[in-house]
Image: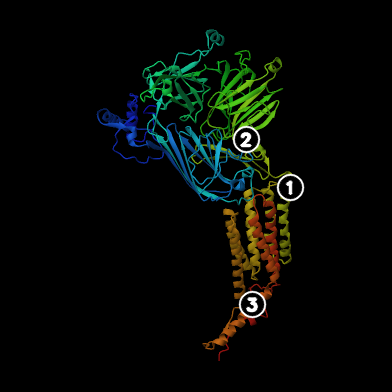
Amino acid sequence: MSVSERPFRSAWQVAVFICAQVSELDERMSVATCKAQESKTNMASNSILGSSSYLILGLFVLFYCFFGNCYSFGELGPFNTFTVSSFSYPPTTLKSFDLRYIRVELPPWFSSMSLTMLSDVDLGNVSIDKVPKSRLPLICLRDGSPPLPDVNASLNDSVLVPLSNSSFEGIQALQNGELCYPMKKNFTMNLTNEQMSPGVLYFGLFNGIGSVRTQSKMINRGPAFYFSANISVEGCSTSTMWGQYCNQTIHPLSCAPSSGYNFAGNVLEAELYNQTMKDVVCKNSFETSCHGDGEPKVYTLDVMGVSEELNITAMNVRFNVTPSNTSGNVSEINLLCFARHGAIPSATLHDYSVNINKAPLIIHSPKVGRWYITLLPVNITKDFGGIQDTNIRVCYSMESKVLECPVGKAGSNCTWEKYILQTVLRKGSAPFESYYLPLSGKVSSEAANFPLEPLQTNSSYGGDPDGPWTYFILDIPQGAAGGNLHIRLTSELKIRYEIYARFGGWPSLDSWDYYYANRTRNSDGSMFFKLYNSSEDRVDFYILYIKEGTWTFGLRYLNATSTASKDQTTMSVSLERCPKRCSLHGECKLALDASGLTSYSFCSCDRNHGGFDCSVEIVSHQGHVWQSISLIGSNAAAVLPAFWALRQKALSEWVVFTASGISSGLYHACDVGTWCALSFNVLQFLDFWLSFMAVVSTFVYLATINEVYKRAIHTAVAILTALMAVTKATRSSNVILVIAIGTLGLLIGWVIEYSTKHRSYSFSIGFCLNILDRWQAIREWLHNLIKTIFRRFRWGFILAGFTALAMAAISWKLETSESYWIWHRQLPVKPICKRLAVAYSTENPPNVNQTGTSPSPNTKGNDLKINRCS
């Protein structure tokens, strides 16, 4: 990588990079760097390109390197890294069944990634198996696309990692799939470039998973938790250093295209196929490399495009010294070669291996990206005749070739047809929604699907026993990893194709990520493969949350007979937001991850369905009918207090009770999906507002005051309860607020009532010194007041009313998203019974005249007269 392309943060890094490039001229010397007189400081969060002033300063320091003092890179210490990015996620509350995604970019030069997360989750020593999945807080990670742990009915052992008291530092390389961990109070994870390939890593936080996660719920009172996170990505300062601490030297292979390469083994075969492959030859910067027994040397090369073969060869393998006897056989030298995509290989962790002195390492259909190759001589002393000499080295010249077929061809002999699928955006659709059509004049581009027969490879061409293949290549754009790739094959008679999909390389019978051969042989058991139709004439499947980048598809044609040639098969490839449009049982919604760089989609299902695609029936049709009848019919209890208010000619209370019952029935009818007379928000506001008004009106009715005062209190209460209903109607504190407002209204009514009835009090003008007579008068007045209160109410009804209110509170506390329809249907009944009981608890009040006074014979007895002092 050139200086202008490499992201540097300071002139010191520019100088380090330049000096390291110069030091590579001598293989036996370690990578060198300039002596910098600055201490290591923390870098900012985002990497930037070095400016021209940095380059000038770097050249000045380079001049100092040539004529001044330079020392080994190792003298700077093992932490030769800089901060590529740093991300802090603020404290966030995750409600029940909510999720959050965090995207982390891992550039090609990253060395390690660390995650520190704090939360208030405390599972204690409870076994994971005993925690319901709907209440289990999880953190999941996946390479290349967002995790989706509840696609399957349950988490299997290979996905859900048991809870541990230690930090999560020993994670092995993340394969295709995802890993999930139970949340902890302190969660720490460290990943290095020896475990993870560069690219994009997604973290997902889930507060409960399962089919009910996407189900619409009338209530959602599950446990919530908060979390905060800090994510830091470290990178190596020089391109020739690697490892967690950037203390491993790697040797990039210099590559250059050659004039051509005949892949066929002989001239007759080459003339038969008439194909010449393009090849890129990569060699070490030095003609010969030497290293001792057990000393590994790491090389890198980049595969830029989808290729057919990667060929690695060691030539002129020999010892650096001539053996003193003839027992040293060069052909018996064990020069092991390990290859791995995206990370440094080892003897225990690699993708491919071979004794490269015996045969070249051939990788068919290598993945696009950076490959790491480790060469390791072993048992040199045995091969050298048993002579113990620490100066013995194995020398060799290494060469690699990346072979690619010409345009329009693919396969082992470049005999199969290859087509690029062009992206066609859908008009007026969600972001990234598109379909793909082949760039070929053989098919029309008017429809979203295309026939396969005109594109099919000639079955008589190539003679491959595996049958003819036709390849397609497409690109998933950056940020579209939250979408789903939809593949459909439709035939007039019978589908005679097998389809194989692979990321970053050509698929084959031995190498694929997802495939469909027939009903019994497919990837339906895979976490991110969802098969919807597998009949003889139709295949329909999705690749869920597809990884962004280059994807290839191989169609293997079967039964190339004359009958089959008359059969027409069409194929469609599209990138969609929600699978099957949420199965017509929900609404497809879009959201962004924490970085705002990835758009992901999810289904918000109706009351009766759940699952990631709303295909799981949670409530049957019969159960939905009974739930609807229970919830809607329970509001008929409002007839009782409304009828009583009408008989008592309490018209304002009759209007409130009647309107409250009707609005509550309409709201629940809309909420369960039966019928919506108005919009959901309007019905919800009316239900809560009128319910609040009905409770307060019941309290105010207990005070026998003039209608003028009642209208004033009702007006004030209407304003307050409307504000409560329109801001956040469903909060639990509203219950306490409504009761408090009603009690306050009752107390105000009593104050007005008693201040009207007892306007005059007789007191002696003189000061009474007889304390006993004074307290006797007060006790007599209190006795008369209590007697009046007891005569005023029917206390049995008062007790029944508050018992109904307590039972309603208990029902509210017990109801969950699963038992909602059982407990919630009792909520309208019990407050209504409470209103009726409280209303019946009042004795027949005396008639109140227009002035608010009541000529009661007991008024005189209630006057406080303290005039007994002598």
Q: Is residue 665 above or below residue 387?
A: below
Q: Residue at x 46, y 33 (%)?
A: 194
Q: Quadrant of the C terminus?
A: bottom right
Q: Which secondary structure lies at badge 3?
A: helix
Q: Pointer 1: what residue? A: 625
Precedes in sequence: disc 3 or disc 2: 2
Image marks 3 and 1: residues in contact by CB distance under 8 Å:
no
Q: Pointer 3: what residue? A: 786
Precedes in sequence: disc 3 or disc 1: 1
Along the line of sight, the residue nearer the viewer: 475 or 248: 248
Along the line of sight, the residue nearer the viewer: 119 or 436: 119
Q: Amino acid at mark 1?
A: Val
Precedes in sequence: disc 2 or disc 1: 2
Q: Is residue 824 visible?
A: no
Q: Is residue 134 visible?
A: yes
**Residue 236 lies in quadrant:** top left
What is the CA distance from the residue labelled 3 to the residue labelled 2? Answer: 70 Å
Q: Name the spot of residue 815 as percent of width and height, x first.
A: 65, 54
What is the CA distance from the residue labelled 3 to the residue labelled 1? Answer: 52 Å
Q: Residues within 10 Å of mark 1 (few under 14, many from 20)?
A: few
Q: Pointer 2: what residue? A: 579
Q: Name the spot of residue 776 as percent of width and height, x first.
A: 59, 85
Q: Which secondary structure lies at badge 2?
A: helix
Q: Amino acid at mark 3?
A: Ile
Q: In the picture provided, is 854 more to the left or to the right than 765?
A: right
Q: Name the spot of residue 638 as percent of width and height, x first.
A: 71, 59
Q: Residue furthest bottom?
A: 870
Q: Is residue 217 above or below residue 866?
A: above
